Amino acid sequence: MTTEYKKPLPYINNETKGLLDGAKSHQLLLRKCGACGQFHFYPRDFCPSCFSFAVEWVKASGRGTVYSVTVCHLPQRVLKMSSPTILHSWNSKKAPMMTNIVGCPNEDIKIGMAVEVTFDDVTPEVTLPKFRPVNKHSRF
């Protein structure tokens, strides 16, 4: 567990609880629509593709590729985060997701880089899914 986690924690509500409960169990869960079959992220109680409320949580592989990198320069006091903040988007065959990539210097993160999920137990109540570069020693 991370000691004295000082960054903002996710807001837990009906739409995010499944994602965060899965993360607590070190599983990456995504929403899937029972009507059209589309996966989506961020978690919502309806499908953004067909607007059906027939959505369920499905375990994802946790593997994907980086398809976007954004560097945000914000004052540290605003978000209690280090500056610059690096935001990465990864894309699985299921749904794109904005995340943090760990275990790799920011300058080494490249579009198309293979990544896999890892979990950071930031507080006793909250575990965050993050991503790391895939390497030959991966257990996947």
Image (cartoon, rainbow, N blue to C red):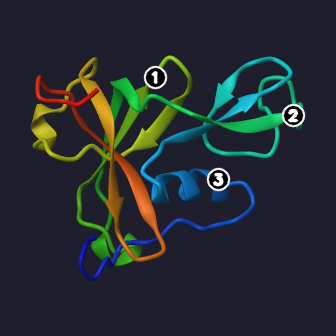
Q: Quadrant of the N terminus?
A: bottom left
Q: Residue at x 87, y 31 (%)?
A: 51
- Displayed quadrant of residue 89: top left
Q: Residues within 10 Å of mark 2 (few under 14, many from 20)?
A: some
Q: Residues within 10 Å of mark 1 (few under 14, many from 20)?
A: some
Which labelled disc corresponds to residue 5?
A: none
Does label 2 or label 1 sit earlier along the sequence? 2
Residue 41 % position (x, y): 60, 37
Residue 102 % position (x, y): 21, 47
Q: Residues within 10 Å of mark 3 (few under 14, many from 20)?
A: many
The span from disc 3 to disc 2 (Cα, nearest Å) is 15 Å
Question: Tag 2's secondary structure?
Answer: loop
Q: Residue at x 35, y 47 (%)?
A: 130
Answer yes or no: do the residues labelled 2 and 1 have beta carbons within 8 Å? no
In the shown orientation, is residue 99 left or right of residue 51? left
Identify which amino acid the numbered label 1 is placed on: Ser
Question: Tag 3's secondary structure?
Answer: helix
Image: 78 above or below 116? below
Which labelled disc corresponds to residue 92?
A: 1
Identify which amino acid the numbered label 2 is placed on: Ala
| Camera-side mark, 1 or 3 | 3
Residue lying furthest bottom: 4
Image: 94 above or below 87? above
Does label 3 or label 2 sit earlier along the sequence? 3
Question: Tag 1's secondary structure?
Answer: loop
> Residue under circle 2?
54
Identify which amino acid the numbered label 3 is placed on: Gly
Image: 117 above or below 136? below
| Camera-side mark, 2 or 1 | 2
In the shown orientation, is residue 35 left or right of residue 82? right
Depth check, front residue: 130 or 86? 130
> Residue under circle 3?
18
